[in-house]
Amino acid sequence: MEVAIMIGLQASGKSTFCRQVLAADHVVVSKDAFPNARDRQRRQLRLICEALAAGRSVAVDNTNPSPDEWLPLIEVARAHGAAPVGYWFPPDLTATRQRNAIREGRARVPDVGLYATLRQLRAPTRADGFDRLYLVCFDGVGGFDVRPMDEED
């Protein structure tokens, strides 16, 4: 079992990656699925715990820009005997803004939100507690190039 933690800006491809690559064998959990919940973090952690208790791997599809967001997820993974795995989507602000601009309704993030996340965004390292880290980029043909992340990435 694993807890796959997406780390990247809004509109960086995290949700598409989850759908195309992880959803077949992971329960996808995202705070976007419950925008009006009072304590979205608590609800997210409850859903992750329920899936892990049932023996299912989980993909956490949020921006998770810093240790403040990913450390509780790593702790929950470890508490359930699951491997915490980070998927890093390096920032490309120009491309992110272009993808975001074609989103509609609540899916479109105001530019101020992108910049606020960018200020918090930090690349994960193994020292943060991840068992494995992957660098994820678009492959140019509708899919993704996923490779193990070096400390230099």
Image: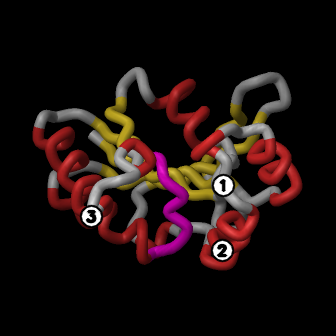
- Screen quadrant of the N terminus: top left
Calculate the distance from the C-alpha at mark 3 to the C-alpha at mark 2: 21 Å
* Image x and y of residue 152, in percent: 72, 68
Any magenta on residue 81?
no
The residue at the point 27 percent across, 62 percent down is 38
Dot 1, how many residues are within 10 Å of its Cα: few (below 14), some (14-19), or many (20+)?
A: some
* Alpha carbons under labels 1 and 3: distance apart: 21 Å
List x then y, in percent, for residue 71.
36, 71
User: In the image, what residue type sits under mark 1?
Assistant: Val
Q: Secondary structure at mark 2?
A: helix
Which residues, given as a range, are shown in magenta? Answer: 61-67
- Please indicate, yes or no, whether residue 4 appears anywhere in the rendered image: no
Q: Which of the two discs, 1 and 3, labels the residue nearer the N terminus?
A: 3
C-beta proximity under 8 Å, tags 3 and 2: no
Q: Which residue is mark 3?
A: 39
Mark 2 or mark 1, which is nearer the start of the sequence?
Answer: 1
62 to 140, vertically: above or below: below
Residue occupying the point 29% across, 37% down: 57
Q: Position of residue 151 (x, y in %)?
A: 64, 67
Instruction: Tell me if 101 is positioned left or right of 133 in this view.
Output: right
